[in-house]
Image (cartoon, rainbow, N blue to C red):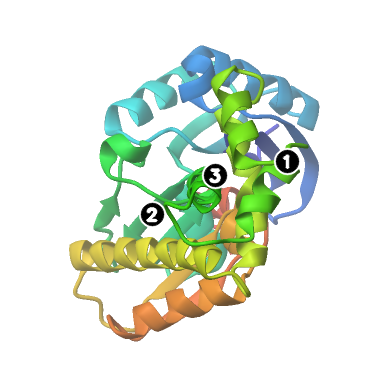
Amino acid sequence: MNGLLLAVDGGNAKTDVALFDRDGNVLGLVRGPGSSPHEHGVDGALDRIEALVIEAGADGPVDHAELLLAGVDFPAEVQTLQARAQARGWAERVQVANDTFAVLRTGTDRGWGVAVVCGAGINCLGVGPDGREARFPALGDITGDWGGGQDLGADAVWSAARSEDGRGPKTSLEQLVPAHFGLGTPLELAQAVHAGAIARRRFIELAPIVLAEAAADDVAAAIVRRLADEVVVLVRVALERIGPVPDPPDVVLGGGVLQARNELLLGAIDAGLEHIVPHRLTVVDAPPVVGAALRALDALGAA
């Protein structure tokens, strides 16, 4: 298997594994269930990845394996996963990092910049020209985070309830949110959630509704602008930590919410960043496994 590489992108919902050679020719590409260590434990996550590695065609150690995983947020987590992945014998050399590195590498080949990932949750990475890194724990509200599809959906449910009982302004979300779950009113939805008939994790399904309604509904637009503000402040803080930078930085956006390319959201992000620093804004559509593959090639000095 000499001369081959593995790229792994493991998220909460799915895992992509690519087997390819030093020229970038893809020999195997498979997708399977999520492999976040937060959800499945370290060994459980690696078991899921290993099944996909075998399915991709790696029947012996390759030269290098690049594992970029959601839920790997602290140095101790990186060290533990890297040691246990190395012990599995997939590759002569294993590199583990957070999946924000995949988005940054997909969106720029400069080696530095800022990446914001907005999927179920939100995370940010800044890398300076000198290699200095700015990271965020990204553990949700306990680390000060707001953003991503789950929070958009939760805010939609909150706003719909207040629209119904008069505590908040009227919004189209009052009808659309419960209708998504086959119900007639926000109160019926609240009762279903309270009784355990509908899981709160399903609120993420409401994110596309919020984005779609933002063009005509003030309440939905306010939720979207709040998300834009969160992205801008993440970029600002990341740049402060890695700065100063010699040139306008690449700001790379990824994850399902940002890949939807909502006009209001992207416009507000771009406008907010203009007040901070000249920049180059990019939304990446390629799956993060592409960034993992590029990092693996970088590690071997490939063209």
Q: Which residue is mark 2?
A: 124
Label 1 or label 2, whichever comes before in sequence order: 2
User: Are there few (<14), some (14-19), or many (20+) residues within 10 Å of tag 3?
Assistant: many
Residue 56, relative to residue 294: is it above or below?
above
Asked whether the residues under the numbered discs 2 and 3 touch, taking CB atoms below 8 Å apart as contact, a structural biologist would say: no
- Residue located 56% across and 30% down the image: 200
Q: Which residue appears at 62% of the width and 15% of the height?
A: 47
Q: Secondary structure at mark 2?
A: strand
Residue position marked by numbered label 3 in the rendering: 157
Give the CA separation, mark 2 to mark 3. 26 Å
Residue drawn at x 52%, y 53% as measured from the top left: 163
What residue is drawn where x is 30% and y is 46%?
136
N-terminal-most mark, 2 or 3: 2
Residue 161 coordinates in the image, percent (x, y): 52, 45
Question: Which one is in front, 123 or 212?
Answer: 212
Image quarter of residue 5:
top right
Please tell me which residue lies in front, 14 or 290: 14
Q: Amino acid at mark 2?
A: Cys
Q: Does the rendering let one see residue 287?
A: no
Residue 184: assigned label: 1
The nearer-to-camera label among 1 and 3 is: 1
Report x, y in % for residue 89: 57, 19
Q: Where does the image place residue 103, in percent across and percent down from the top left?
A: 52, 56
Q: CA distance from mark 1 to mark 2?
A: 38 Å
Q: Does residue 226 appear left or right of residue 263 in this picture?
A: left
Which class describes the residues within 10 Å of circle 2: few (<14), some (14-19), or many (20+)? many
What kind of residue is marked 1?
Gly
Q: Which mark is residue 258?
A: none
Which of discs 1 and 2 lies nearer the camera? The answer is: 1
